[in-house]
Image (spheres, rainbow, N blue to C red):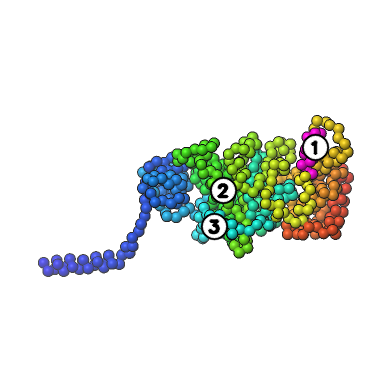
Amino acid sequence: MNRLAEDVRQWAARSRERVDRAALEPQLARFGRIVQAGDGVVLVEGLPDARLDELLEIEGGVAAQAVDLGEAVIGCVLLGEAAAVTAGRRVRGSRDVIRVPVGEALLGRVVDALGRPLDGGQPLAAQSTAPVERPAPTIVDRALVDRPLATGVLVIDAAIPLGRGQRELIIGDRGTGKTAIAVDTIINQRASEVICVYAAIGQKASSVARVIEAVRRYGAPERCIFVVGEADAAPGIQWLTPYAACSMAEHFMQAGRDVLLVLDDLTKHAAVYRELSLLLRRPPGREAYPGDIFYIHSRLLERAAKLAPDRGGGSLTALPIAETQAGNLSAYIPTNLISITDGQIYLDPTLFYENQKPAIDVGRSVSRVGGKAQAAVVKPLAESLRLEYAQFLELEVFTRFGTLVDERTRRVIEHGRRIRAVFTQPQYQPLSVGEQAALLLALSERLLDEVPLERVGSFRERLRDWLAAQLPEALALDDRSQPLSDEVRTKLRQALAALAQAVAGQPAAAGG
Ligand SMILES: Nc1ncnc2c1ncn2[C@@H]1O[C@H](COP(=O)(O)OP(=O)(O)O)[C@@H](O)[C@H]1O
Ligand SMILES: [Mg+2]
């Protein structure tokens, strides 16, 4: 009897010791359960205190984002394969918003909206992360846009110049060269220190591959990040892509760097958001888009900024792209985006079919802040160009009817045709500031007016080598150079006149 009592006493002592040693801190996990699942969204009950944009983990490993907070049921967007997600599964709240990896390790990589590699490379090592949604810099954190962002596309840099920290919409019908302009701008950054982030939203895999291939071939891919949410990715991933890309870009801006963010395109982003919203049974508004469609794009594009010097002076330039149907700029999403951005580059299908590429309609395009930041050496040369070109376009319409025109009008038209020919530019061949200044000087000095129209292209093609041999200092000009001194201007004019003569005199077969 005594032995038994002793055993019990010892057992109790051991147990108490074990209990004392065990780490029994309270661990709080919040679980809910899926009540309805389908098409990339789920409804979850039992998580009444979930936060907006909270990251949720569904039993089985798929992540979800809480986007619609009801009293009893919350609406969530799936960020992964939907097939395995069924009603009844447990859902765990993380108490954290969705985050993406940020930093140098991303440069040169192709990732999805959660930072998972898509290029077959190593997963990104654990490093710093940033939430996908962040408040935009406040007004006191910002400075005025004062440095150009050279696109290398002459018509843009001359007539619709962009500044670092600006938001410029590229808008036009399908297949009019919107992506081409963005890609050329990225390629042109091979000559600058600008970091480029390209976000592909809802695009075909083949289109994305073409873009990546072009940048790898002609640009500086080691300074680019590709964030891809293809058309067959989960709608939630597509929806998240621009925000994730923006966070990745923002990280470099906050480190004092200049960043270019291309969002290709926000029309598809709006369509994905509409699809998700309808599935979540949110009330549809105009064109069946949910009521907050304006806000989801404005809060994204507001994050583009030029930071004040005491904030590091970095910048984030955003080039959102929007696709129109039959040139309709007054549809809901295009008007929203036009009103959010600092200007738009409008691509016209008629120009495209007339082989005027890039098919930019100068009259309907505008850059509301970049003019103040235009490269100093280009600015005085480009000043009268827009007006001359507009006058020419107006006059040209008349001559289409075979009207006889006087000598002065004929000259305006011939000159205008040269401007248009110089503005025509093949893909993947961005022009440096020096080449642009030379071409604009040739135009303003009317050196091309005697060159046959079909050879103007040849003039542009031979320009680089010609200047390299005759006046290398002209090629060294960049966006920080001062306006041409009289001396350089005279020398450049002479070199250009000689080239014009050589091109005009060359045998027709060799003409461009
Ligand atoms: N400046 C250009 N010169 C020649 N071809 C061009 C030019 N810009 C675009 N293209 C061609 O036009 C087609 C459509 O361009 P893309 O940029 O894909 O259009 P979007 O993005 O508007 O749908 C592509 O085949 C592209 O190669
Ligand atoms: Mg495109």
Q: Which residues are magenta?
A: 388-399
- Is residue 458 found left or right of 216 in the rendered image? right
Q: Secondary structure at mark 3?
A: loop
Residue 361 at what x, y percent from top left? 71, 41
Write the residue at 86% across / 32% down: 404
Say above or below: 54 vs 277.
below
* Residue at mark 1 to residue at mark 3: CA–CA distance: 53 Å
Q: Secondary structure at mark 2?
A: helix
Quadrant where the C terminus is found in the figure: top right
Quarter holding residue 29? bottom left
**Quick one: which residue is furthest to the front in this view?**
140
Q: Label 3 amino acid?
A: Val
Q: Label 2 amino acid?
A: Ser
User: How many discs appear?
Assistant: 3
Residue 43 at what x, y percent from top left? 41, 43
Q: Residue 396 colored magenta?
A: yes
Say above or below: 118 vs 310.
above
Q: Secondary structure at mark 1?
A: helix
* Residue occupied by mark 2: 298
The label nearer to you, 2 versus 3, is 2
Q: Residue 501 colored magenta?
A: no
Check disc 3: other Cα within 10 Å, few if <14, some if 14-19, many if 20+: many
**Quick one: which residue is furthest to the left in this view?**
1
Image disc number at residue 395? 1
* Residue occupied by mark 3: 102
